Image (tube, coloured by chain):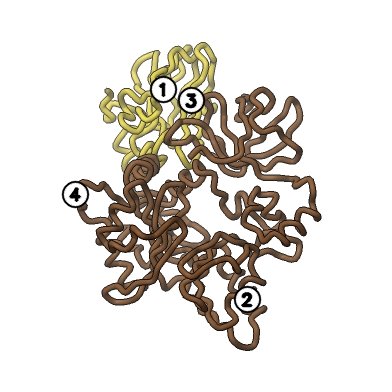
């Protein structure tokens, strides 16, 4: 049985092409992945991300307990701010990556991946202290929207003028027509953007409002296909591709998001940080790099593509690879991508191209 | 621009212009619609001899790479070089400027029985 977004019928009416995403029937596009990608970079697009998990945590001990549970340093997260973090297993492997929003002194919203929400919630329930921390898993009964793109601020200001005061990663809780909602200046596209979390009835109203004619601001619905190419261009990892339970955040190049003490501990466990996730950029015209394609240094296979696409902005093949040995960043002679027995030169770089 | 009603179709969604020893090959409008935005096309080398059912080209959309099979045996005589700079021609005009390659039929072999006319293709594979 597949799960459906509360906005499924709305997507169908817009002519969405659906795909299975972690058990959810979600729109992969509404006509063209490339057009939707470019819309975000040039104007603004709206994504239904209601498949993502939504777990509320509250109580006098919520902050202290979450800080023990999660990998980033929650002690420095003020109310009205959000933070990228991980749930790790005993070996430091990533069980899921998630965003924590601090809604109030003692109230937090956790947004794990659709694929990870059950594991995250079960783990939390098992480790829940006897008192002073309360969990509420509202996954599946919340509408989550990502309003992303260059013009996202201009559009969101028409909905709520207060959004202009939000800096990146900041948020506020406000009252809508029928329920409160969270508006955060967050996203996963590499462009400016906002995310909205609210109840189903109000979410439907907001979806409809966002897609009406806004005059000079061009805005359309976008699917998960564009969300994927946008995050690849921006150099953001995806759980299941670049992150999994066998690798630490350090191996994925995400040590910045770890508490200093944990970072040192994980570094000591695997000083070489191998295998490791690295960003690559093709140096010549290539077919789209795809997960599973091999990367060679001379005759030696050194890695495998975990994500890739032809950047809709530049046409370059870009993405992530898992490499088994030390590589040199920006070396432009040695590394080749193999596609159907042809070799294409690439370089490894520190981050995405956006 | 071909009229699809004049073309023959394969079960794997290629079309051919029939009734000539030099046949043009492309993919159906239905196929380009299923694939979505086409971002890369790998075409065969001119002069390559191909047999029926052989994978000779690759059409890649954002999400998937699809093999294109030779609907007839023969020699590749021309390829659509415009696709190298603009693969979306296949999306825009599957039966016109989005053609893929031309095969010179060398023997008098009749086209395979599995080729269908437009009406059969539409009713069996599209609707």
CA–CA distance between discs 1 and 3? 23 Å
Residue occupied by mark 1: B85
**Residue A5 shows in the view:** no
CA–CA distance between discs 4 and 2? 47 Å
* Image label count: 4
Nearest-to-viewer mark from 4 and 2: 2
Residues tagged by mark 1 and mark 2 found on one chain of the structure: no
Residue occupied by mark 4: A215
Which residue is at a point 21% across and 52% down the rendered structure image? A214
Q: Are marks 1 and 3 in contact (CB under 8 Å)?
A: no
Nearest-to-viewer mark from 4 and 3: 4
Q: Are marks 1 and 4 in contact (CB under 8 Å)?
A: no
CA–CA distance between discs 1 and 4? 34 Å
Q: Chain under label 4?
A: A
Provide the secondary structure element on which disc 2 rests: helix
Per the rendering, the colour in which chain A appears is: brown
Provide the secondary structure element on which disc 3 rests: loop
Residues tagged by mark 4 and mark 2 found on one chain of the structure: yes
Which residue is at a point 61% across and 73% down the rendered structure image? A66
Q: Which chain is yellow?
A: B
Residue occupied by mark 2: A64
């Amino acid at each position: 049985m597949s799960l459906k977004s509360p906005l499924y019928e709305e997507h169908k009416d817009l002519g969405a092409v659906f795909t299975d995403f972690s058990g959810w029937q979600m729109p992969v596009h509404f006509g063209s992945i490339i057009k939707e990608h470019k819309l975000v970079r040039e104007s603004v697009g709206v994504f239904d991300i209601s498949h993502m998990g939504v777990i509320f945590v509250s109580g006098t001990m919520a902050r202290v307990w979450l800080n023990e549970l999660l990998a980033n340093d929650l002690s420095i997260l003020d109310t009205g701010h959000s933070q990228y973090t991980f749930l790790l297993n005993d070996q430091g492997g990533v069980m899921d990556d998630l965003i924590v929003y601090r809604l109030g002194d003692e109230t937090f919203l956790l947004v794990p991946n659709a694929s990870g929400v059950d594991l995250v919630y079960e783990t939390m329930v098992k480790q829940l202290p006897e008192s002073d921390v309360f969990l509420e898993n509202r996954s599946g009964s919340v509408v989550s929207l990502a309003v992303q793109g260059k013009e996202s601020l201009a559009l969101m200001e028409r909905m709520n003028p207060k959004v202009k005061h939000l800096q990146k990663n900041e948020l506020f809780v406000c009252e809508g027509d029928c329920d409160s909602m969270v508006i955060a200046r967050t996203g996963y596209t590499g462009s400016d953007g906002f995310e909205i979390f609210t109840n189903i009835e109000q979410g439907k109203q907001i979806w409809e409002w966002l897609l009406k004619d806004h005059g000079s601001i061009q805005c359309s619905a976008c699917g998960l296909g564009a969300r994927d190419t946008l995050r690849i261009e921006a150099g953001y990892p995806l759980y299941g591709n670049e992150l999994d339970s066998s690798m630490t955040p350090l191996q994925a190049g995400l040590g910045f998001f770890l508490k200093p003490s944990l970072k040192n501990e994980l570094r000591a466990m695997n000083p070489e940080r191998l295998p490791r996730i690295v960003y690559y950029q093709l140096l010549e015209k290539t077919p789209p790099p795809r997960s599973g394609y091999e990367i060679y240094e001379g005759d030696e296979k050194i890695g495998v593509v975990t994500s890739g696409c032809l950047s809709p902005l530049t046409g370059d093949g870009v993405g992530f690879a898992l490499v088994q040995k030390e590589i040199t960043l920006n070396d432009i002679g040695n590394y080749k991508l193999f596609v159907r027995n042809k070799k294409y030169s690439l370089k490894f770089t520190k981050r995405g191209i956006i | 621009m071909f009229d699809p009603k004049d073309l023959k179709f394969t079960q794997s969604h290629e079309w051919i212009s029939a009734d000539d020893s030099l046949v043009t090959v492309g993919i159906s409008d239905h196929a380009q619609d299923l694939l979505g935005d086409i971002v890369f096309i790998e075409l065969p080398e001119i002069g390559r001899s191909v047999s029926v059912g052989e994978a000779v080209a690759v059409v890649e959309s954002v999400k998937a790479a699809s093999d294109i099979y030779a609907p007839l045996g023969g020699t590749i005589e021309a390829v659509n070089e415009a696709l190298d700079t603009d693969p979306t021609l296949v999306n825009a005009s599957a039966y016109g400027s989005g053609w893929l390659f031309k095969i010179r039929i060398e023997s008098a072999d009749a086209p395979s029985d599995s080729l269908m006319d437009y009406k059969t293709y539409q009713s069996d594979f599209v609707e």
